[in-house]
Amino acid sequence: MTRLLDVRDIEAGYGGMRVLHGLSIHIDDGESIGLFGPNGHGKSTLLKAISGLMRPSSGTIAFDGTDITGRRPPAIVEAGLIHAPQGNTLFGDMRIAETLELAAFSRRAGAGAAKRLEEVYALFPRLAERRSQLAKTLSGGERQMLSIGCALMCAPRLLMLDEPTLGLSPRLKEELAAAIAEICRRGVPLVVVEQDIEFLLSLTSRLYLVEHGTVVREIDRDNAPDHAEVMRLYFGEEGTH
Ligand SMILES: Nc1ncnc2c1ncn2[C@@H]1O[C@H](COP(=O)(O)OP(=O)(O)O)[C@@H](O)[C@H]1O
Ligand SMILES: [Mg+2]
């Protein structure tokens, strides 16, 4: 069976600093996965390597059976592998509607853009209400919605979301979580980076714990850690005292 994504033995870093050390993950057809682990251990770096924003020094990345290692981001977007990066990366002086339309620049996304725009507005009514508003005037939650909206405008065959609910209020987090669950229900495979293991398991079938730039544990619903173990995973033994 062809895997949707097959990342093998990736090494990557910044300048002389190695961040990813022989990291391997995969996504089988029809599944979504989650990534979690302590801050600064390479989760965002992994997503950047997959989407071509940085070039791995060794290892391979295959998407739907095609080797995409070292390809440039536009080619990877064109293949349908879409990355909604962590943090605010929007153009502040553009309006919501313009931002979403621009996001559908790729050849494959261009055709169905009008229909997709309506789908994004249906998923995020706040964006529809504010479609003429400048991105820089949006709240943190609304920016996150716009960022995911842009990713959806690219007609993803695989959508990678990097900490989409980071820093949001519980109410907004819930709103965003419901929208992500809906994207999942519509059949878009996801890679979701989040710290909340229960939330990840509600969306995806398998999780990878990333530490020191490599996968140290694989989790599914049958071997999900209990609360005490989660504390240990994040904070070491002292976290349980
Ligand atoms: N643009 C960058 N330049 C240099 N170092 C970076 C850059 N981005 C991240 N790093 C470093 O790489 C390591 C992994 O970061 P990151 O992949 O963002 O971790 P995570 O997403 O798991 O929090 C950290 O030590 C971080 O400081
Ligand atoms: Mg990160």
Image (cartoon, rainbow, N blue to C red):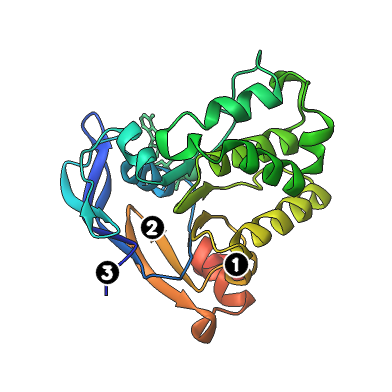
Residue 213 on image: x %, y %: 32, 52
For mark 1, what is the residue? 203
Residue 231 on image: x %, y %: 58, 68
Q: Tell me the number on the disc at residue 2.
A: 3
Q: Amino acid at mark 1?
A: Leu
Q: Residues within 10 Å of mark 1 (few under 14, many from 20)?
A: many
Q: Residues within 10 Å of mark 2 (few under 14, many from 20)?
A: many
Q: Is residue 97 left or right of residue 81?
A: right
Q: Please name which of the two marks, 1 or 3, marks the residue nearer to the observer.
A: 3
Q: Amino acid at mark 2?
A: Glu
Q: Give whichever of discs 1 and 3 has the lower sequence position.
A: 3
For mark 2, what is the residue? 211
Q: CA distance from mark 1 to mark 3?
A: 22 Å
Query: Pointers 1 and 3 in contact (CB under 8 A)?
Result: no
Q: Would you identify the image quadrant in which residue 2 lies? A: bottom left
Q: Would you identify the image quadrant in which residue 49 lies? A: top left
Q: Would you identify the image quadrant in which residue 214 lies? A: bottom left
Q: Residues within 10 Å of mark 3 (few under 14, many from 20)?
A: few
Query: Pointers 2 and 3 in contact (CB under 8 A)?
Result: no
Residue 189 on image: x %, y %: 49, 61
Q: Amino acid at mark 3?
A: Thr
Q: Which secondary structure lies at badge 3?
A: loop
